[in-house]
Amino acid sequence: MNEVMKHWLCLILLAVASLAPAGCSRSSEEPPLQGASIGGPFALTDQNGRTVRDSDLAGRYRLIYFGYASCPDVCPTDLQVIGQALTQFEKAAPERARTVQPIFISVDPERDTPAVLKDYVGAFHPRLIGLTGPVEQVRAVAKKYGIYFVKQDSEGASSYLVDHSRQTMLFGPGGEPIALVPSDEGAKAVVETLDKWVK
Ligand code: NI
């Protein structure tokens, strides 16, 4: 290819690239949670005992759910939906799906040790990270992410329920809030949300 041809080819590619965002983007809408004051830095311990910081996830979308391993029904149902949806998205769009990091943050860190979380998260998706930490630290993170939780009164010290917000959230590669994810509506709805916002 001579220099002139190379030059023209570059110009054409540039023109195509600059049109692409307007013409071919997956969604030209603004993300529903754009600018929302939720999210932010955290440093918690994963199911392998390693510290995970939000900055370790730079460049990855974060699919975040707060709950606890002994939750009798809602958490396992939602996590199952999230796991199934991500598996389906991985089959449909492997490259985009690989950029999505599913994260489960415990609202019951007293019982949810890394060992407990290791058994738990593996049941839902092979890449699901389970995070825990000192109660005060977890509480501060939950607050930043708009999640409420409170231990219910109980007879025994080790058998109690935890009331908590039921919310699945999608954050972008820079940690910016994007959208709530309808995990209560089934895997198909979750796949649609991921397909819409994960570029
Ligand atoms: Ni729950």
Image: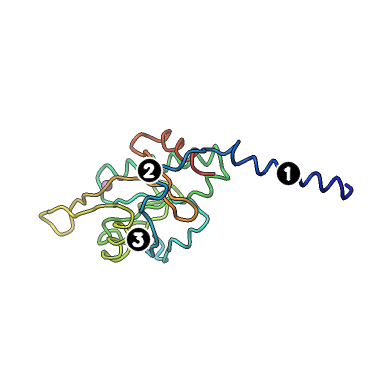
Disc 2 versus disc 1: distance between alpha carbons? 36 Å
Q: Are there few (<14), some (14-19), or many (20+) residues within 10 Å of tag 1? A: few
Looking at the picture, which amino acid does disc 1 mark? Leu
Viewer-nearest of discs 2 and 1: 1
Question: Looking at the image, how many numbered discs can be counted on the residues?
Answer: 3
Q: Residue at x 35, y 61 (%)?
A: 114
Q: Are there few (<14), some (14-19), or many (20+) residues within 10 Å of tag 3? A: some
Q: Residue at x 87, y 47 (%)?
A: 4
Q: Are there few (<14), some (14-19), or many (20+) residues within 10 Å of tag 2? A: some
Residue toward you, 97 or 145: 145
Percent position of residue 162, x then y: 21, 51
Ligand 1 near label 1 (Cβ, under 8 Å)? no
Percent position of residue 97, x then y: 52, 45
Residue assigned mark 3: 115
Q: Residue furthest right?
A: 2
Task: Give the mark, 3 or 2, whose residue is nearer the N terminus.
Answer: 3
Looking at the picture, which amino acid does disc 2 mark? Leu
Task: Give the mark, 2 or 1, whose residue is nearer the N terminus.
Answer: 1
Q: Residue at x 32, y 57 (%)?
A: 144
Percent position of residue 19, x then y: 65, 40
Q: Which mark is residue 13?
A: 1
Q: Which mark is residue 180?
A: 2
Residue toward you, 94 or 56: 56
Percent position of residue 73, x then y: 26, 42
